[in-house]
Structures are given as structure tokens and as C-alpha cells.
Amino acid sequence: MITPFDDTYFMKKALQEADEAFSKGEVPVGAVIVIKDRIIARAHNLTEQLNDVTAHAEMQAITAAANFLGGKYLKDCTLYVTLEPCQMCAGALYWSQISKIVYGARDLERGFGVMGTKLHPKTTIEGGVLEKEASEILKRFFIQKRNLN
Ligand SMILES: [Zn+2]
């Protein structure tokens, strides 16, 4: 039997959050946090609306998931995020001890990989899930933004 709850399924949920960010004029990055096939946090980038450079999708998802669980550690949780986390988010994810991170598009400029940020040794990572969709929405956003200026 094939479970509908695979990485693609949850990444699509994260992409819906990215769409939400796009419609608000925010850089379209979305995230969900999942435990036992259940979404416990949904978030998208809100740096413009909140006037806060730390309001990345992952940061908000971490806080929401910890609130939901009533504990600060995100053991047994998986984060799905449409763009490779930056070093700030990777640092926060380190502290959360999250079990797994799945991301869509790579960020070769500001991703944690190129920045050399270490994740927690308990965290496993997987990249490139729905990569095309995740990078396409970002491209579309920046093209539109350029045309408006
Ligand atoms: Zn970030």
C-alpha cells in the first residue's frame, strides 16, 4: 500500500504556504512541520509584514510546533521547507534538535550548505524534493518584483 503521506505530499503543503507568502508580496518560502504524518505547524515568510528579518518561514514554524507540543525540542518531527534553510534557520533548527529536514530548492548563495553551518548530529537532511516547483515560484516572484520597479 502506498501512503499518501510522503515527502511530496508534505512539500506540496509547504508550497501552498509559499503561495500565501507570494500573494502578500513576501519572498515566497513556505514551511510545515510534521509529526507522525500530522501537520502541527504551517508558516510562510513574513519579513515584510512583520518588519522583521528573522520572520523566515522556518523560524515561525519552529515556534508554532514547540507551542503545539508543549516542549522546546522537536524530536520525531520533520520540517518541510521550500527553500534550503539559511544559516539563521539552520542554527535555530540545530537548537530544536529536529529529527529531519526536507527542503525543495537549493540556495547556492545563502543556504546553510554554502555558508558551512552545521546541523545537529541527530538531524538528517534531504534536499531537492519538488525542487522545480519551489524554485519556479521564487523566480516568478523576483521577475514580477523587477518589473514593478
Ligand atoms: Zn532562514
Image (cartoon, grey):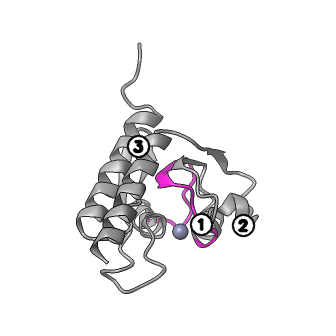
State whether residue 98 is above or below residue 104: below
Looking at the rendered structure, the kind of residue marked 1 is Cys
Disc 1 to disc 3, C-alpha distance: 19 Å
Residue at 32% from the left image edge and 78% from the top image edge: 149
Kindly identify which residue carries mark 3: 133
Residue 115, numbered label:
2
Please say if the residues under marks 1 and 2 sit with CB atoms less than 8 Å apart.
yes
Q: Secondary structure at mark 3?
A: helix
Circle 2 residues within 10 Å: few <14, some 14–19, many ≥20: few
Quarter of the picture containing the N terminus is top left
Disc 3 to disc 2, C-alpha distance: 24 Å
Residue 86, numbered label:
1
The quarter of the picture where residue 110 lies is bottom right
Among the two numbered marks 3 and 2 on one chain, the one whose residue lies closer to the N terminus: 2
Looking at the rendered structure, the kind of residue marked 2 is Met
Using residue 39 as the reference point, say whether residue 83 is left or right of it.
right
Circle 3 residues within 10 Å: few <14, some 14–19, many ≥20: some
Task: Confirm whether the magenta stretch covers residue 54.
Answer: no
The quarter of the picture where residue 61 lies is bottom left
What range of the chain is rendered magenta? 70-88
Looking at the rendered structure, the kind of residue marked 3 is Glu
Provide residue 6's location: percent of width, then percent of height.
Answer: 44, 31
Residue extending farthest left? 23
Q: Is mark 1 within 8 Å of ligand 1?
A: yes
- Disc tally is 3
Provide residue 121's location: percent of width, then percent of height.
Answer: 75, 54
